[in-house]
Image (spheres, grey):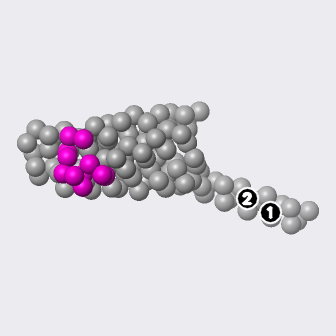
């Protein structure tokens, strides 16, 4: 009986840690994706100083989205990751416009993931 209680407690602790990781990373992914969109739009209007911030935020958003997906799989998070990866590829091509378009699509999916998570 005691061993069963310990096993159940450990399973609960491990599972709650994963949920915590997911709940921390998804909002961070959204926050950095929003920042990337803002910097992308600014760079598309001639603000070349925004390009490094666009790249930095896209990379950080992708890291958080992957951590969120690892903690708790969600099809919307997965689709957001696809667009964030495409955005990273576009940054390597120095295409701020394409990067911004993919960031906007990623943001839609990450926000959908967050809304389904709240239920």
Residue 20 horizontal/vertical position (percent):
56, 53
Q: Residue furthest bottom?
A: 3
Can the viewer see residue 32?
A: no
Residue 24 horizontal/vertical position (percent):
48, 51
The residue that appears at 24% across and 55% down in the rendered structure is 92
Look at mark 1 in the image and give the residue it sits on: 7
Residue 36 highlighted magenta (yes or no): no
| Mark 2, other Cα within 10 Å: few <14 / some 14–19 / many ≥20 | few
- The local secondary structure at tag 1 comes to helix
The residue that appears at 39% across and 34% down in the rendered structure is 108
96 sits left or right of 8 in the view: left
95 up-or-down from 107: above or below: below
Q: In which quarter of the image is residue 18?
A: bottom right
- The local secondary structure at tag 2 comes to helix
Quadrant in the picture for the N terminus: bottom right
Secondary structure, magenta segment, majority class: helix
Can the viewer see residue 11?
A: yes
Residue 36 horizontal/vertical position (percent):
27, 46
Look at mark 2 in the image and give the residue it sits on: 11
Residue 71 horizontal/vertical position (percent):
57, 53
Please tell me which residue lies in front, 18 or 90. 90
Quadrant in the picture for the C terminus: top right
| Mark 1, other Cα within 10 Å: few <14 / some 14–19 / many ≥20 | few
Q: Which residue lies furthest to the left in this view?
A: 46
C-alpha separation, residue under disc 2 versus residue under disc 1: 6 Å
Span shown in magenta:
88-98
Verify CB contact (< 8 Å) between mark 2 and mark 1: yes
Residue 90 highlighted magenta (yes or no): yes
The residue that appears at 43% across and 54% down in the rendered structure is 64
The residue that appears at 39% across and 52% down in the rendered structure is 62
Give the mark count.
Answer: 2
């Amino acid at each position: 009986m005691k061993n069963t209680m310990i096993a159940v407690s450990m399973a609960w602790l491990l599972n709650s840690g994963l949920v915590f990781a997911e709940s921390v990373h998804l909002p961070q992914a959204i926050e950095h994706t929003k920042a990337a969109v803002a910097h992308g739009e600014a760079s598309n209007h001639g603000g070349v100083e925004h390009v490094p911030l666009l790249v930095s935020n896209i990379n950080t958003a992708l890291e958080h989205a992957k951590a969120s997906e690892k903690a708790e799989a969600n099809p919307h998070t997965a689709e957001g990751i696809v667009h964030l990866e495409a955005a990273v590829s576009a940054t390597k091509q120095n295409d701020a416009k394409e990067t911004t378009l993919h960031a906007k699509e990623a943001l839609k999916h990450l926000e959908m993931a967050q809304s389904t998570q709240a239920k």
